[in-house]
Image: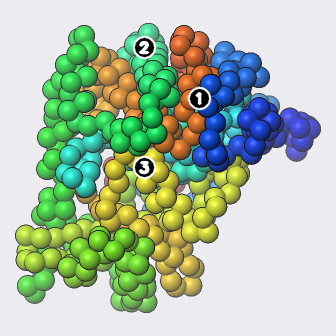
Amino acid sequence: MSKRSAAETPAARIVAAEERAAQLEGGPQGVVRDGWLPAREHAALGKAARKATPRAAHAAWQPPPDRADPIALLRGQDAERVPELVPIRWGRMSVSPFTFYRGAALVMAADLAGTPVSGLRVQLCGDAHLMNFGVFGAPDRTLIFDVNDFDETLPGPWEWDVKRLAASVVLAARHRGFTTAQGRDAALAAVCSYRTWMARYAAADNRAVWYSRVTADDALALAQETAGARTKTTATMLAKARAHDSLQAFDKLTTVVDGVPRFVDRPPLIVHLGPDQADLAGAGRRAFADYRRTLSDDWRTLLDRYTFVDLAFKVVGVGSVGTRDLVVLLMGRDDGDPLILQLKEAGPSVLEPWAGRSRYSNHGHRVVAGQRLMQAASDIFLGWVRGGGAQRRDLYWRQLHDMKAAIPAEQVRPAGLELYAGLCGWTLARAHARSGDRMAIAAYLGAGDAFDRAVADFARAYADQAERDYALLSRAIKLGKVAVETGV
């Protein structure tokens, strides 16, 4: 049991910081504040928060004596996952410290809860690592760059997303064999971009913030303007995204059986439900009808032009492996008009023990609401449902492929990583500016690079921690305490 008093716990420190902010503001601190305040008062709030929590305080990372065993924390998640898929999850996490970090959002959430916060809150991604950003198609078919994973989204301290992003940049640099200086430069680029763009959004009017988006053209222009940056990787990623749609997925994932398209079984990555799971298949069809009701009238009309054809289990991601994930095939006017939707399980956010419970009773609704709030433009088929069966699970729906692509971490060069990190910092600032007090956050950050340098120091120290945690996993695998399935 911890020897720390109740007033010293991470949750208590977060609450205290938020109470200080609320006292300065004259009202309760939330994601979106009620009423109107002059910009100077928002700025005063940020400057006061800076005095209470100096920017340099964000540099430190030292694991507390009572830090929870990271492998035990992650194994605790296994109980709610499909047992036969759990070794695949561990196998994917065992590849490198970088892949371990991608699947260990829960571990970092517990660690971040003990770090300093300003008391200013935003809608968090909750898992803002480098690979959870990328390009996808907006409803007007413009390619935009944005955050693209929201399984852990929840209101909380804005610093948590920034620190998780910065540490992931350092780990990516190490994964590629870059120098310490190159990794630090890339982390600084991410945080500097966040600070610079938050200041710009603080100076903009409300509608301009909500209209703002980072397009593929912006990414290419930035690559061309950055000294030494090569645009080949960026251009390749964008070309891949444009071709990555339902028609491509249809060609790749399906075949024709008795004149009807069906998903191709590729165990364990894609499998149809067996005869003993007929009740689950029926529940999937009922879930589709319930999901339809969460769409707006116009998108529901579009969905009604498609017919439900097939359903199968699919394994995706790293940290998500083992959660219930299905793909649904629908067909439109002919064989050239497929639509593939993904039905993904949504459990409680890993942030909840420290940031507070979601106000949504359905975690699928939590994910969809958070995504719509943070993204400049979201998938038109986003929706949610509560699944049937013996264990009623929260789920959300989205398109499986909608012109999506991410940077190939195995190919990026130092200048490219710095460029990409800056793009991530930009889009994270835009996402946070939509939900939080952008003027207060900008005032807290200031015009200098004190916060940038502090978070870069934190990122290096936490990357060291992630490598130590990865070593614990490697040892557990070697001793047979964690079963893994690799190459899947």
Q: Residue at position x 16%, y 32% from top?
A: 235
Q: How many other residues sit within 10 Å of disc 3, few (<14), some (14-19) or many (≥20)? A: some
Disc 1 from disc 2: Cα separation: 33 Å
Q: Where is the C terminus found, in terms of image quarters? A: bottom left
What numbered label is drawn on residue 39?
Answer: 1
Along the viewing direction, whichever of 458 and 305 lies nearer the viewer: 305
Residue 60 horizontal side relative to residue 211, left or right: right
- Disc on res. 149: 3
Q: Position of residue 350 (x, y in %)?
A: 61, 51
Is residue 143 toward the left or the right of residue 13 in the image? Answer: left
| Label 1–label 2 contact, CB within 8 A | no
Percent x, y of residue 259: 8, 85
Whichever of labels 1 and 2 marks the residue nearer the N terminus, that label is 1
Q: Is residue 318 above or below residue 338?
A: above
Task: Please state which of residues 168 and 258 is positioned toward the viewer in this rendering.
Answer: 168
For badge 1, the amino acid type reads: Ala
Which circle's residue, 3 or 1, is located before the other in the chain? 1
The residue that mark 2 highlights is 185
Q: Single out the mark in the foreground, 3 or 1.
A: 1
Snapshot quadrant of residue 303: bottom left
